[in-house]
């Protein structure tokens, strides 16, 4: 019998396809209303939504030359010393739209006269009611506690905004190809899940990603921690080399996200080093040279643009996390110590 989590992982291609078609006009209207009314973006988010915000840092930086900062909500709720948001566009991302600290950031932004956008799966939520504009995820009720479809839908919402700000037809066309690429990746990776049994007894691992997939490393590590009780740490290759690389021993599990793109050569160099150190290497990639060096290789769809690869790479990580949960004998729909809605202040 399938779990809610498994069903929601496999539902993602259809959900993203529907979302792109349903909300494109909304994103266009928002873009037309606020274009040229801000100079940088501040994003308030927690958990998986915060990882989507990390993706936005690369997305808006690379495609729109817009600097993106991650908000520090405790300045708004605990220290009561909110910073000036002058010239900022403020975006809140929350699946439930209920976390008071994220709402507080947007409330302050509106008091300072700044434009605000809520990206949420619940259009009637407190976050949505606080914002000037709502960009709905259209993901349907997420029954599993661990977020999957709302994570990729949050990335898609951000990508739609970026497309509207750049008004580049080629980039928009690339985004519309994402659902098919996600479906291909699901089909490629699903056949490999029996091999995850090899990792049943791990209790720690490292996840490496850079560029657009820096966010993916954080999200995969979060899914592993949430679902399996494994201590998973996420790094870019650069940060990993600045100290944490000392933890590598023979058999140490390292998950590397290595799609073709601008940072691919850097990940390949690290894979080669880890191979020499006899680490246990798990690779998510569409590059044969990376996949061939892995003890467990998860191929993603070929010919995926660098900037849209996180939609496919994260699916491989979700499947790995799901199957590791099963192998360890845990319930993927009821992670230990978690609830669906987490309210932080």
Image (cartoon, grey):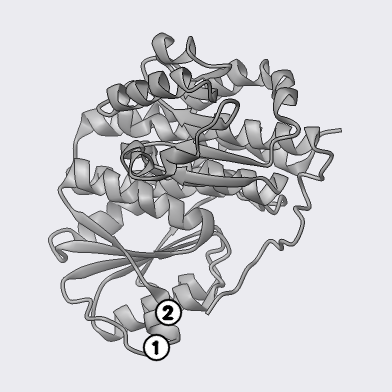
Q: Position of residue 250 (x, y in %)?
A: 57, 26
Q: Secondary structure at mark 2?
A: helix
Q: Secondary structure at mark 1?
A: loop
Instruction: From the image, tell me which residue sits under label 2.
Output: 74
Q: Residue visible at 52% across and 78% down?
A: 100
Q: Position of residue 7 (x, y in %)?
A: 71, 36
The mark tally for this picture is: 2
Position of 254 relative to 120 (above/below) = above
Pick the residue in front: 243 or 229. 243
Pick the residue in front: 188 or 328. 328
Give residue 258's quadrant in the image: top left
Q: Residue visible at 25% across and 32% down?
A: 171
Give residue 297's quadrant in the image: top right
Other residues around mark 2 within 10 Å, as few (<14) / some (14–19) / many (≥20): some
Residue 13 in view in this figure: no
Q: Residue visible at 15% across and 48% down?
A: 65
Give residue 332's quadrant in the image: top right
Residue 79's disc number: 1
Q: Position of residue 219 (x, y in %)?
A: 51, 45
Pick the residue in front: 166 or 273. 273
Image quarter in which the N terminus is found = top right
Q: Sequence order check: which comes first, mark 2 or mark 1? A: 2
Residue 336 in view in this figure: yes
Q: Residue visible at 70% across and 47% down?
A: 227
Query: Do tag 2 and tag 1 residues touch (Cβ < 8 Å)?
Result: yes
Q: Position of residue 260 (x, y in %)?
A: 33, 20
Position of 127 relative to 213 (above/below) = below
């Amino acid at each position: 019998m399938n779990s809610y989590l498994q069903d929601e992982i496999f539902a993602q291609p259809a959900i993203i396809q529907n979302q792109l078609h349903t909300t494109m006009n909304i994103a266009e209207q928002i873009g037309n209303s606020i274009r040229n009314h801000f100079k940088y973006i501040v994003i308030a988010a927690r958990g998986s939504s915060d990882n989507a915000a990390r993706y936005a840092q690369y997305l808006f930086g690379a495609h729109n030359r817009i600097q993106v900062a991650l908000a520090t909500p405790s300045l708004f709720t605990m220290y009561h010393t909110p910073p000036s948001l002058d010239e900022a566009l403020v975006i809140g991302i929350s699946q439930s739209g209920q976390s008071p600290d994220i709402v507080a950031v947007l409330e302050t932004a509106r008091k300072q006269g700044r434009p605000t956008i809520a990206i949420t799966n619940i259009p009637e939520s407190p976050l949505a009611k606080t914002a000037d504009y709502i960009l709905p995820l259209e993901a349907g009720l997420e029954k599993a506690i661990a977020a999957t479809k709302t994570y990729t839908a949050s990335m898609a919402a951000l990508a739609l905004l970026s497309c509207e700000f750049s008004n580049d037809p080629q980039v928009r066309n690339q985004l519309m190809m994402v659902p098919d690429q996600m479906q291909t990746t699901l089909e490629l990776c699903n056949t490999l899940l029996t091999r995850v049994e090899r990792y049943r007894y791990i209790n720690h691992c490292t996840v490496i990603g850079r560029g657009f997939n820096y966010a993916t490393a954080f999200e995969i590590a979060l899914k592993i921690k949430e679902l399996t009780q494994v201590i998973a740490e996420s790094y870019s290759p650069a940060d990993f080399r600045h100290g944490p690389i000392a933890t590598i021993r023979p058999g140490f599990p390292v998950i590397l996200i290595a799609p073709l793109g601008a940072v691919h050569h850097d990940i390949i160099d690290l894979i080669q080093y880890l191979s020499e150190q006899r680490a246990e290497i798990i690779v998510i990639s569409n590059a044969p040279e990376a996949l061939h060096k892995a003890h467990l290789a998860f191929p993603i769809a070929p010919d995926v643009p660098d900037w849209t690869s996180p939609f496919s790479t994260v699916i491989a990580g979700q499947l790995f996390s799901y199957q590791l949960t099963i192998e360890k004998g845990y319930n993927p729909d009821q992670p230990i110590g978690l609830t669906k809605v987490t309210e932080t202040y």
